[in-house]
Amino acid sequence: MKKIVEIGCISHRYPDSTEVCICGLEFFMYEKEVVGLLGGNGSGKTTLLSHITGLLSPTEGQVRVFNLDPRKEFKKIWKHIGVLLQSAEEQLIGPTVRDDIAFSLKNAGWPREYMKRRVDEVMQDLQITHLAEKIPHYLSGGERQKVALAGALALRPRLLILDEPFSRVDQKSKKELAELLRAVNVRHETAILFTVHDLSHLPSLAHTVYVMKQGELLARGCPQEILLNLPLLKEAGLEPPSILELVELLRERGVDLPYTLDPEELASRLSAMLPGGINCKR
Ligand SMILES: Nc1ncnc2c1ncn2[C@@H]1O[C@H](COP(=O)(O)OP(=O)(O)O)[C@@H](O)[C@H]1O
Ligand SMILES: [Mg+2]
């Protein structure tokens, strides 16, 4: 499989002299891969993404995206990436939702008729057709994020980059968003890179997970192996999923249970241990 992102050891100095080194493991992504970048606040996730999009350039080290230098080949790269920033408000610039979503298509010089069809299509996919003529500024946080995502998807990017997409939406919308992103990945073979500090959406969405702490890439693995590695999560200062904490507490009390993320499995193991299963008797 082809690698579409490759980053060795890089360092970046912000204007106020803060130095961020992103080192440890090599960071890479394959085409069509869904990668979750996991780390606490200030661990360097946004800095890493900004190097991939070419918004920042490294003071040392090399970044390759589609085998190009994103800083030098900014225009070429932006034809193939869609970006959702951490604060979706900042990227909504059109006077109406429809204009906003059409922005990248207009820039790319798409003919008017073609553009309209594509905007309608992407609004339908995201179920925001009813918002088409609204002013983005007056939308709710969740709606704004959907509009920004529609704009990022309008050009059918090969790589979609999302900074903390799950952090400001409610539980129900988180599930919908994960399903939508999975559908984009499967239907259009779009590679997806997203950052998270909450572990609950990794298993259903990511193929691969990186764990980051203070710029250091500590591990790369499939979601199960990362999430079941409690010492690693502890080292990275991350809260393990509550189902794992429950298993850990029960094991400490002598209950023989496997580490599992699957509530169904846990429920059947527990009910098999109880005489007569789980049963409320009055
Ligand atoms: N514009 C900036 N100027 C100075 N320091 C910054 C800037 N942006 C980020 N940093 C610093 O870089 C480090 C990594 O930040 P960031 O990449 O935003 O982490 P994360 O996205 O994981 O929360 C932090 O120590 C942060 O304070
Ligand atoms: Mg960030």
Image (cartoon, rainbow, N blue to C red):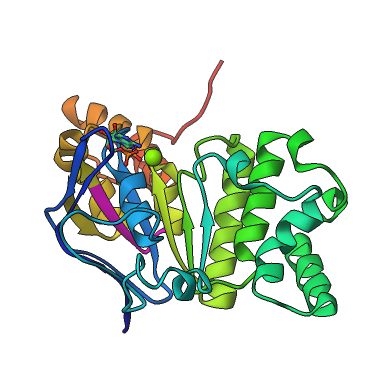
Q: Position of residue 173 (x, y in %)?
A: 63, 42
State the extent of the magenta-drawn residues as a range: 206-211
Front-most of 119 and 250? 119
- Please, which residue is most extreme toward the bottom here? 1
Say which quadrant the N terminus sits in: bottom left
Residue 168 falls in image quadrant:
top right
Q: Does 248 appear above or below 135? A: above
Residue 267's place in the image compared with 71, above or below, is above
Task: Report x, y in % for residue 106.
Answer: 71, 69
Residue at 83% x, 48% y is 131
Q: In front here: 77 or 3?
A: 77
Please tell me whether the stretch drawn in magenta is mainly helix, strand or loop: strand
- Where is ligand 1, by quadrant? top left
Is residue 127 visible in this depiction of the protein? no
Above or below 261: residue 171: above
Q: Quadrant of the C terminus?
A: top right
Quarter of the view holding residue 55: bottom left
Residue 66 visible, this angle: yes
- The question of residue 210 being in magenta is answered with yes
Left or right of residue 157, residue 18 in this image = left
User: Residue 175 location, x and y as percent?
Assistant: 58, 47
Residue toward you, 20 or 168: 20
**Residue drawn where x is 78% and y is 80% of the image:** 111
Horizontally, residue 83 falls left or right of residue 89, namely: left
Whether 218 is among the magenta residues is no
